Amino acid sequence: MAISREQVLHVASLAHLDLTDAEVEKFAEQLSAILAAVSKVSELELADVPPTSHPLELVNVSRRDEARPSLPLEAVFANAPEREDDHFRVPPAEEVRET
Amino acid sequence: MIDTLRLTAEEALGMLERREATARELWDAYRAAIAERDEELHCFLTLVDEPEGVSVPIALKDVIGTKGIETTAGSKILKGYVPVYDSTVASRCKQAGLPTLGKTNTDEFAMGSSTENSAFGPSRNPWDPARVPGGSGGGSAAAVAGGLAPWALGSDTGGSIKQPAALCGIVGLRPTYGTVSRYGIVAFASSLDQVGPTTKTVRDCALLYRVIAGRDPCDSTTADVPEVELPEREDLTGVRVGVPREMMNAEGIEPGVREAVERTIELCRELGAEVGECELPLSVDYGLACYYLIAPAEASSNLSRYDGVRYGLRESNGGYHEMVKRTRDAGFGDEPKRRIMLGTYALSAGYYEAYYGQAQKVRTVILREHIAAFEQFDVLVSATSPTVAFELGAKTQDPLAMYASDLLTIPSCMAGLPGLNIPCGLSDGLPVGLQLIGPQFAENTLFRVGHALEKAIGFDYVPERLRG
């Protein structure tokens, strides 16, 4: 179950990870091995088995739609790398090229 | 003279009540122990200066959000991050008067089985500092075993409380999914993560579980919890103990581990339990594969929030997209990167059904097999870890070898079931852990069985090299 360099780059791009060439090679090898191991799940014939997304079957857990105090703005920005008034300042978005 | 290596939390509570020691004296004793031994063991990432609370101090794994105290999840991407609110479990500890000693070391984002994935260096096993304490919650386990904290909280996704407890010779509980709030916990895999106690004894475990468990309006995946019973009985009359064949015969179990577990199963009989063999036909064989698809998939989603925008590391370079990618590349270590990519792959178009979709079905199979076993038995037993503590560096080159450490803890995690580790013996001078698995919400059964076995086994949890 080999993962190609292109596939690693594609997945890294989806996950917003900027990998070095050395990393791409290392991860391609390791991910291939791991994928080979986890692909084992496809050995089983489970067409009639429903999927489980949660081990506890809770349904419609809700609360009353009442406003409650949330975080004060000072707290919201306490760990901000860069703040401008009541905004998190980030560099402007550049044009994204497909990899 | 307070012997922090031996003192249990229950004994400490008694001392405070009888005014044999003040809260300050207790705090100072643990701080002195930390000053003496933590440079070697590296259990703590952050220490709190002044105690807030007048009861027994506690250490918290660094994935547990603590207001005003740095919380890094063992990662550079959160270095310097100070939460502005308490997690529910931290808040409940505060309400119980337990002062936080500090935050303990963990594999990065709770991903690992040795703490070697921590961005801040590994922790060491108090039984042999050349060996790992287990992971991801190795810091908490080593702190308790090394007498640096009377008790601690950890988190368990695939075994991160139970396995370190096994390797360090102490008690660890992974509670039923939904019994302890995940609000304010750094999320790894949301359908699997649970916070739980790491303690010296089973009674301490029950006491701490009682502090943190219960429905939380801030976490809609929590449920009401049966009242916690402190265990007292020392026999196992009427208890049906099941031994899953596939767990006993699993690949990679060291002979010394197997022997200690078999002796303990015999002990169950002597204590009056009905012991029988049972089957989990596919759970052990396919459990690892199932977990290493579902957990990374959920992690890829949970870790997408670390983008340098609102908190944590930011690598400012170029435009917005460049910043996000550079931040994540610089801030995440190899293991989170591997799991994020694995998870992204498993969820991507064209692969979703074959990988993630199929893994969810395997999860149903695992759940059903356990439910079937519990029709015949009250508790299932196995080794917790296939091996005793391994040497630092022994498995870091091979991710799959490291993942195999979780072979026995993972299946019950997939089913949301509670699991208790108790030390059951030594192999080559290193602790062996016994895993007790119960049906959902059966913590009281686990406490009862664990306590009775603990009394009968008489394991000395003070590491041999540290005994006076």
Image: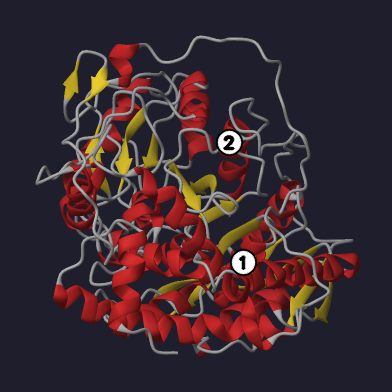
Q: Label 2, on which residue?
A: B181
Q: Chain of mark 2?
A: B
Depicted B311 relative to depicted B348: above or below? above
Residue B49: where, in percent of width, then height? Answer: 21, 25
Q: Is residue B356 visible?
A: yes
Amino acid type shown at disc 1 = Gln
Quarter of the image where one finds residue A14: bottom left
Image quarter (top left, top right, bottom left or bottom right) of the N terminus of chain B: top left
Q: Residue B253 location, x and y as percent?
A: 53, 86
In the figure, A41 relative to B31: above or below?
Answer: below
Provide the secondary structure element on which disc 1 rests. Answer: strand
Q: Quadrant of the C terminus of chain B?
A: bottom left
Answer with mark 2 or mark 1, whichever residue precedes in sequence: 2
Name the image quarter holding residue B41: bottom left
Please state if B369 lies on the left or on the right of B414 as rendered: right
Q: Position of residue B177 (x, y in %)?
A: 65, 48
Identify which amino acid the numbered label 2 is placed on.
Ser
Number of marks present in the image shown: 2
Which residue is rendered at x = 57% and y = 74% of the image? B355
Residue B262 seen in render: no
Asked if badge 2 and badge 1 are on a common chain, one would say yes
Q: CA distance from mark 2 to mark 1?
A: 23 Å
Residue at screen point 59% across, 72% down: B290
Give whichever of B353, B242 is nearer the camera.
B353
Residue receiving disc 1: B435
